[in-house]
Amino acid sequence: MSPRQAGHLSRRGLFGVLGGSVAGAAVAGGAVACANDPSGPGAGGGAQAVDFHGDHQSGIATPVQANLHFAAFDVTASDRGALVDLLQRWTVAARAMSAGREVGESGVAGGDELAPPDDTGEALDLPASRLTVTVGLGPSLFDDRFGLADRRPAALSDLPVFPGDALEETRSGGDLCVQACADDPQVAVHAVRTLTRMAAGTAAVRWAQLGFGKAASTDATTPTPRNLFGFKDGTSNPQGDDAGVLGEHVWVDGGDDAAAGWLAGGSYLVARRIEMLIETWDRTPLGEQEDLVGRTKAEGAPLGVADAQEHDEVDVSALPATSHVRLAHPSRHGGAQLLRRGYNYVDGSDGLGRLDAGLFFISYQRDPAAFVSVQSALARDDGLNEYLKHTGSGIWAVPPGVGEDGWWAQGLFEA
């Protein structure tokens, strides 16, 4: 071991040195137990690690974390085996990072000093921070490159271009997507950085988006968050522990579509980058803002209901005809509900002193037709359109969760 390696031991390397000492055997035994236990200190403590395994991928019904790093990838390899290998390696890495462990055999500093480390290290001293990593497969992946054309679910097709869309190709689409959410932004960035690094030669980032200040909640015990217009966002969002609602509106069951059997237990992810014209909004009178949204700004109560509270039932007929809440209400879309996991974003300024800011909208739904129905109504009649510009868009099929020995989208390639 060189002096440089001795001064930069990884957690794994440190435990190995301790284990080699009789005097330190008891200490080493305790340390190793913590290192191998996702709930131990090395993983950030029990409540800070979200279980990676299950019937559904984490990061969907999971209580929404504070920060997001979302990335879409184009697969550059044309070999099916390379794609499978990437998904397998990504799964192993995400499993480790979700538990707060280092990536790779040698981690941050346990390898050859003449070779790049397995783990980039920026999350080394941080807890797991409830990291979840969720992966989706875009319509463009199901072409003739990988022999998947006959396995594309009928519901997985590019979203239509809605009236008023100003979509940028460099902010839309992608063969694969990765959604990393965590309570520490550096942990989320580390996750996407790691998977991007591992994808070299097989896939490359097409576009990416950072998000902060969650603009939706899947946990009834936390206050409804606010978007950058200052209004509560996602008051009626489905809750992550409501199995009945999730089963009806979020999880795919395969149904009569033989090609979608591999997707049972998964979902469909829709992402939209929605630029908000902040400066124009800030000059709009309060009463007009509330009429445009359909709720009061302070309480988030529905308009038109006397002494209403935030979670009181909405009287759709009492709302302005062009209000956002009225147009998006489930009663107007066959009862369809979208599970939202949106985030606010600020990407500096536009060069004219105006904020380049808005909402990175994410929703999960059992059938993308539910989103199309809602967005079609909003694009046509929503009074908020004067203050919004949709610049990015994408849809992906999100495979079901994995077991301890499984890997993402395994059913798609092995069935």
Image: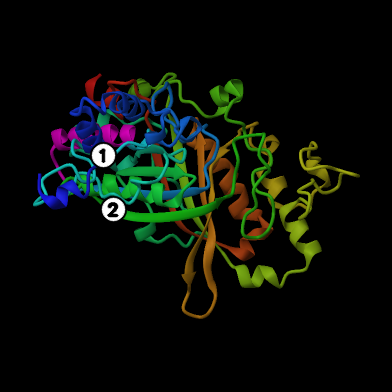
SS under mark 2 = strand
On the image, numbered disc 2 is attached to which residue? 205
Q: Residue at x 71, y 73 (%)?
A: 283
Whether 92 is among the magenta residues is yes
How dense is the environment of label 2, judged by Cα within 10 Å: few (below 14), some, or many (20 and up)? some
Instruction: Tell me if 47 is positioned left or right of 36 in this view.
Output: right
Examine the residues drawn in magenta and state their main secondary structure. Answer: helix
State the image quarter where residue 370 is shown: top right
The quadrant the C terminus occupies is: top left
Amino acid at the residue labelled 2:
Val
SS under mark 1 = loop
How dense is the environment of label 1, judged by Cα within 10 Å: few (below 14), some, or many (20 and up)? many
Amino acid at the residue labelled 1:
Val
Question: Farthest front residue?
Answer: 23
Indicate whether 384 appears above or below 21. Answer: below
Viewer-proximal residue, 409 or 110? Answer: 110
Question: Farthest bottom residue?
Answer: 352
Coloring basis for residues:
rainbow
Q: Position of residue 59 (x, y in %)?
A: 46, 36
Q: Position of residue 81 (x, y in %)?
A: 14, 33
Instruction: Tell me if 299 is positioned left or right of 129 in this view.
Output: right
Can residue 76 be seen in the rendering of this structure? no
Instruction: Tell me if 253 is positioned left or right of 138 in this view.
Output: right
State the image quarter where residue 282 is shown: bottom right
Cα separation, mark 1 vs mark 2, equals 20 Å
Q: What are the residue bounds of the magenta stretch?
A: 76-96
